[in-house]
Image (cartoon, grey):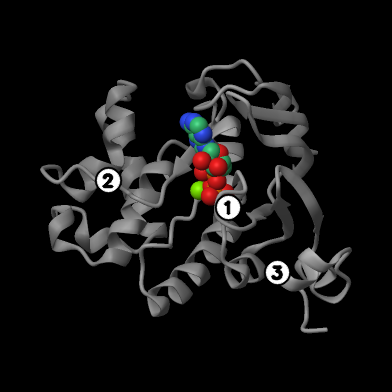
Amino acid sequence: MSGVKLTNVKKSFGEVDVIKDVSLEVPKGEFGVFVGPSGCGKSTLLRMIAGLEETSGGRIEIGGRDVTDAEPARRGVAMVFQSYALYPHLTVAENMGFSLSLARAPRHEREEKVREAARILQLTDHLDKKPSALSGGQRQRVAIGRAIVREPEVFLFDEPLSNLDAELRVQMRLELTRLHRQIGATMIYVTHDQVEAMTLADDIFVLKGGHVMQSGRPLTLYDDPDNRFVAGFIGSPA
Ligand code: ADP
Ligand code: MG
């Protein structure tokens, strides 16, 4: 069963072909990581899956449904960004429940979902605080909480840890792995950090120059890279 499937997806900005021809599949419930150097088109690809950017060609399917031309809100995805822009005047609980208030979810349902997300993210004791009273890691967890309450079929993460210091990144990686086990949703995670990719992924997709250079299990790429680029980027020192 396919979680997210891209078939011959392309994207050009004017004359520039940023995504040349990408076909890939992240199976339902798996953790897929797109990794590649800065500027290779990772965010563009993720934004197309989210519906924030139109495709220039190809097909995008989520859970077997063709969503290529679907509104973002109808795709069953929630995206977590690197700059997590929480509302400073709202509490943690209000920040997490905000999208549900927009969707006019009943108050008790909203509170229940926020409580459950807070439990998963160990934010229960912080629900009444303002973001300014939180650490960087806690703020990032609130941003993830905003996605969790929407109960998406697919979580999309765009370098969510890159503003955090090294120690916190290690901790948040473990938490993301735990979150994935607990929730079981399909997750796609974009990063330029090879260690993040190796430790988080069920499957890695190495992007370069608008193509997938190689994809597979982390250890397969590490032990058996197809080419010099993958070897240099991920693989064992030859
Ligand atoms: P990554 O996330 O891998 O660093 P991006 O997807 O952000 O890469 O960008 C890939 C390329 O596409 C870059 O060269 C960037 O300048 C270009 N690009 C991204 N968005 C736009 C846009 N809206 N208009 C023009 N060029 C863009
Ligand atoms: Mg990016």
Apparent side of residue 112 relative to residue 209 in the rendered image (left or right): left
Q: Which mark is residue 72?
A: none
Q: Which residue is mark 1?
A: 189
Cα separation, mark 2 vs mark 3, equals: 31 Å
Q: Tell me if mark 3 has few (under 14), some (14-19) or many (20+) residues whose alpha carbon lies within 10 angstroms of its own.
A: some
Q: In the picture shown, does residue 36 fall above or below 106? A: below
**Cβ atoms at labels 2 and 3 below 8 Å apart:** no
Q: Quadrant of residue 227?
A: bottom right
Q: In the image, residue 222 lies at what x, y percent?
A: 79, 73
Apparent side of residue 221 relative to residue 107 in the rendered image (left or right): right
Q: In the picture shown, does residue 107 fall above or below 85? A: above
Local SS, label 3 = helix
Q: In the picture shown, does residue 140 fall above or below 11? A: below
Q: Tell me if the residue at label 1 has its CB under 8 Å from ligand 2.
A: no
Q: In the image, residue 166 lies at what x, y percent?
A: 41, 77
Q: In the image, residue 100 lies at what x, y percent?
A: 33, 30
Cα separation, mark 3 vs mark 1, equals: 17 Å
Q: Residue at x 32, y 66 (%)?
A: 137
Query: Which amino acid lies under the numbered mark 1 shown in the image of this protein?
Result: Tyr
Cα separation, mark 1 vs mark 2, equals: 19 Å
Q: Which mark is residue 233?
A: 3
